[in-house]
Amino acid sequence: MTSTLPSRELLNELKLAKGKNSLIFGITEDRDGLSQLLKSNNFDVRLIDLRDNGNLLQMLVDWKDTPGNAVYLIYGLSSQFPAVLGYLNLHRDLLYQIKRPVLMAVSEYEIREIQKHAPDLYRYRSRTYNLKSKGKIETKPIFSESKPVYYKLPIFEEKIDADAIRDRIKLDEYMLGTITDDYNKSEIFMDIAVSYYKLDDLDKGDDYSRKSMHIKELLNDEKGIILNYDRLIQVFLFKTQYRKVIQLSSKLLKLNPTTASTYENLAEAYRMLGQIDKSLECLDKAIELDPQAARSWFNMGLALDDLGRKDEALKAFEKAIETDPEDAAAWANNGYALYYLGRIEESLKASEKAIEFDPQAAEAWTNKSSALAQMGRIKESLEASEKAVNLNPKLAMAWNNKGSVLYDLDRAEEAIEALDRAIELDPKLAMAWSNKGVALGSLGRMEDALDAYEKAIEHDPKDAITYIALVRLYRKLGREADSIEACKAARDLIETESEYNRACFEAVCGSPDAALALLRTALENKEETADWARRDPDFEFIRDDPRFAALLDEFSPDGEMGA
């Protein structure tokens, strides 16, 4: 930024304001240039970016810890419109307590909004500099004709702070008393509506959203109407009210049928309601409208995975990555799909790629844990699962993985504690129930183990592997009739499993000839080692068969003979 007349006068004023309270507005689009100008003149510049949704006055409370030549340079004010205007106007006196110059870098639009909606704050200022021209302008309020205005409304928040939301409503109501412009008024009505929806006050939310929509209709503000529908859809996605999302998305598509994001939202709602076919139809339409929409490909991968179509899901995740190579969630789900397709090393690499782009992605750490466990890297797997539960203590699959790995380390009691936590978080997680059955069985708690396996089957009736454990336990407890019924129920399911798992199934179901034939094929294909087969409890009913011992001896290294 060149040191023109207004910038020289600004520097002089800042030097005079050292160690004093002073509010200055600088109209500029070159915030970086202004910062460099201040630094080159020996000011300690403290940047505050309001686009991060911080509270400006709270950010200034540490002014005493700054040197005497410090200047606060504020920018991004409009990202917090409209609430910040009412807030600063009401609490402007707090600026008196800050004995450092506060320089707000604003656009012409922002200064107009401050003049209209925070007049007391504007009057409090020391001066206003137009750093875009060659002369200082002490602007008189430059009220322009009413024009459309659209605020960035805070919809997605990790944690709902009810008190903060109520304070925002009060500020919005204060703003309504100062505003005559209908465009601004309609935006504030919608901001209040969003706040009430977050507080689960649907009646008031509906009331204010109708007021906002009514004004926009009177103004023929088609863009604003479409934006309002989209905001409401986002709110109800956030609140998991999926039927409302479907209703609003259908209305929005009548107004604007060519927006891919609306079909994406509709697809997500259908998927969460279990209507996967409808979800896929919407995603096909979204991709037709925008083939480069990474979110559409990602959601298609999720929907296909829900249907068990792992190969197709993997292709969709790969397409999402192709479209957005730094999408951590797409990499994580790509790793998940690869794992269930038996491509373990590729799964690990994909999970590590997800972690590279988002080290806080608990799901990626969970997938990494699964892959490492499958590769026999048990201690590393435990470290990854512990990282996952630390990042997201409410992620049931992470606790499941931790429990499974603890069992592999012969820490069955700890494993059960972790698996109980997984089940507490997701009572329908069949894998956790099944793993709990394994751990309980190792401690000799057969009846408890049986209950866990039955729960696993209840939540996933197509889990062939759990059926193997269930049949084995029925036989050990002398419940032959139940064992036979379970074998019949699982017979069709087991046909798609590996030769090794089918060998286990035949062994527990009392068919030693079939079990041994399948086990030979499995060992030849290196699906498992003879050492593991020697210890696998699923073969306990044929362990005394000399043919079993001979088969394992045939595939065992020297010195590891005998069943």
Image: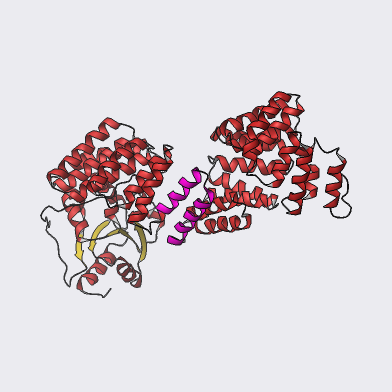
User: Image quarter for residue 32?
Assistant: bottom left
**Residue 283 placement, left or right of 23:** right
| Residue 299 horizontal side relative to residue 206, left or right | right
Q: 304 and 199: which one is in front? A: 304
Residue 184 position (above or below residue 32): above
Q: Position of residue 83 (x, y in %)?
A: 26, 45
Q: Is residue 360 visible?
A: no
Magenta span has 305? yes
Residue at point 24% right, 67% down?
10
Check the image and report above or below for 419 versus 79.
Answer: above
Residue 88 belongs to the span the image colors magenta: no
Q: Is residue 76 visible?
A: yes
- The part of the image, by quadrant, that contains residue 110 is bottom left
Choose between 534 and 61: the one closer to the eye: 534
Asked whether, in this view, residue 463 is left or right of residue 476, the answer is left
Residue 352 versus residue 41 in the image, above or below: above
Residue 373, given in percent of the width and then of the height, sits at: 67, 49
Residue pictured at 67% horizontal, 50% vertical: 374
Q: Which residues are magenta?
A: 295-323
Where residue 347 sits, quadrant-wise, is bottom right
Q: Position of residue 51 (x, y in %)?
A: 34, 54
Main SS, magenta region, reads helix
Total residue callouts: 0
On-image quarter of the N terminus: bottom left
Foreground pick, 314 / 125: 314
* Image position, residue 352 (x, y; %): 57, 57
